[in-house]
Amino acid sequence: MASVFCFNNVIFRGVRNFRGNTFYAFKTVNTQIRNSSSAVNKSNNSYEYDLVVIGGGSGGLSAAKEATNLGAKVAVLDYVTPSPRGSKWGLGGTCVNVGCIPKKLMHQAALLGEAVKDAQSYGWQFPDAENISHSWDALRDAVQGHVKSVNWVTRVELRDKKVEYINGVGVFKDPFTVQTVTKQGERLLTAKYFLIAVGGRPRYPDIPGAIEYGISSDDIFSLPNEPGKTLVVGAGYIGLECAGFLRGLGYDATIMVRSVVLRGFDQQMAEVIAAEMQDKGVKFLHKCLPKAVEKLDDGKLKVTWVNAQKEEFNDVFDTVLFAIGRRALTRELDLAKAGVKVAGDGEKIDAVNEQTNVPHIYAVGDVLYKKPELTPVAIHAGRLLARRLFGDSTVNMDYENVATTVFSPLEYGCVGLSEEAATEKYGADNLEIYHGYYKPTEFFIPQRNISHCYLKVVALREGDQKVLGMHFIGPNAGEIIQGFAAAIKLNLTVQVLMNTVGIHPTIAEEFTRINVTKRSGKDPNPASCCS
């Protein structure tokens, strides 16, 4: 199958081989090819690399390593522009450095603080229990120590797999050439294929003082000083997770909510999470927008905001953390010079099976339009793409029914459709919503609050009732929902779920005992731990 396109007076003619790979020959029209001094001869279709990956995060690295396993010659370009506060980090991308990994470690630190309190109820004796305190400096240093070790291991792994790592920013010069500037000078890299995997960085609101005095998730995990009284602007999963572990570590935490909590997630579950966090001491400012951040003489930050009624308020904080979303780093790539189009939002790339409108240029991860912004998604998509380009595979990434977890103090794990999305797609009359509250055994003796331990199964009403979505709020939610994600991939039904024998006493077994529907109006609370 042939494809032809013209760019900058150059005609590219591509032909797919039996593996689905596209090979290009091209000629100029009334012009000469620039950069003729390049180390390769483009007209002979001889490229320096088989694959150049722009971005050293999870998705790009997984594609690079898999491609080398399949015999390809690969280079990875990666450079971290410091945050407005000067934070920077090593190879590995957002997840390793300023995302999933440090977040989970700090979440674990907060859970351990709660566990220390529970331990006394179980008979553990702490003579100085009243004097137990937490050190931000010790936690930060431990987290950063682990992150740096992962950076090093990643560098070594690339070297062992013979992936060339280039610490530089990649910018397109034409559809087959990327320019980078390193400490050694300027380089031009040509490749048969390019993979855009640059991810994104946090947004800041366009208000006075936001960039000058605020921080983001790029900064919180390496913050040199204790965060103290913190305002988190934004109620997505990053905002909730940061406020949750800060409160768990003993700091005053407030979340400013523009519209709704956890937009895009099941809203009933989101309300339960917000209520549970409030019980833990996190404050919420609903329907509010920040207007300005001002630094006072004592170094504290005065924040002014307005509510839905346009009433103005202010308060003083030690730290202001913005978690209002992230932007894809595509503008920095000069995509127009490669002919790559972006989606209607002006930032993300609307690719089909990771392939952009330029056939030999691909994209994975957070730069993709309307795809889950999750590390495992980027990793899997990158690996599958490499197998299609350099192996005999024809397997494409399946972006449906991807499980995820919000690491709030009481975790929320989900897979599949929310109740709202299922209603919109199938209609309320065609759905059966099973739900129930439950009592974690671990909560009994410490008499911890169980009022927010809740789960829901969204299913079709007819036949064996195919499961469309599963939602769980409780301890270890991520570990629990992972197995059910595989079951949903295999078309799990409510009948199968109810015929599955649970492991007792666990909280995962609650899904196998669920039998109350919202439509029935019955009490979803359990009569006992074994009911």
Image (cartoon, rainbow, N blue to C red):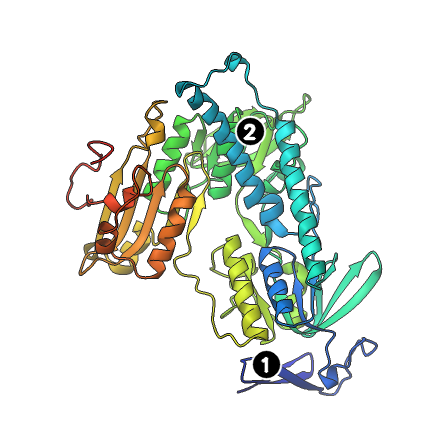
Q: Is residue 29 left or right of residue 443?
A: right
Q: Secondary structure at mark 2?
A: strand
**Residue bearing mark 2:** 230
Residue 1 x/y as whole percent: 53, 87
| Nearest the eye: 355 or 205 | 355
| Residue 214 shows in this picture | no
Give the label on residue 22, or none.
1
Look at 29% across and 39% down and name the residue there: 504
Disc 1 crowd, CA 10 A, few/some/many (<14, 14-19, 20+): some
Residue 176 x/y as whole percent: 69, 74
Q: Nearer the viewer, mark 1 or mark 2?
A: 1
Look at 54% across and 56% down and name the residue there: 366
Label pair 1/2, CB-CB below 8 angstroms: no
Look at 39% across and 35% down and name the residue there: 274
Look at 64% across and 40% down and name the residue there: 146
| Nearest the eye: 107 or 336 | 107
Q: Secondary structure at mark 1?
A: strand
Whether 10 is drawn above or below 179: the answer is below
Whether 524 is drawn above or below 332: the answer is above
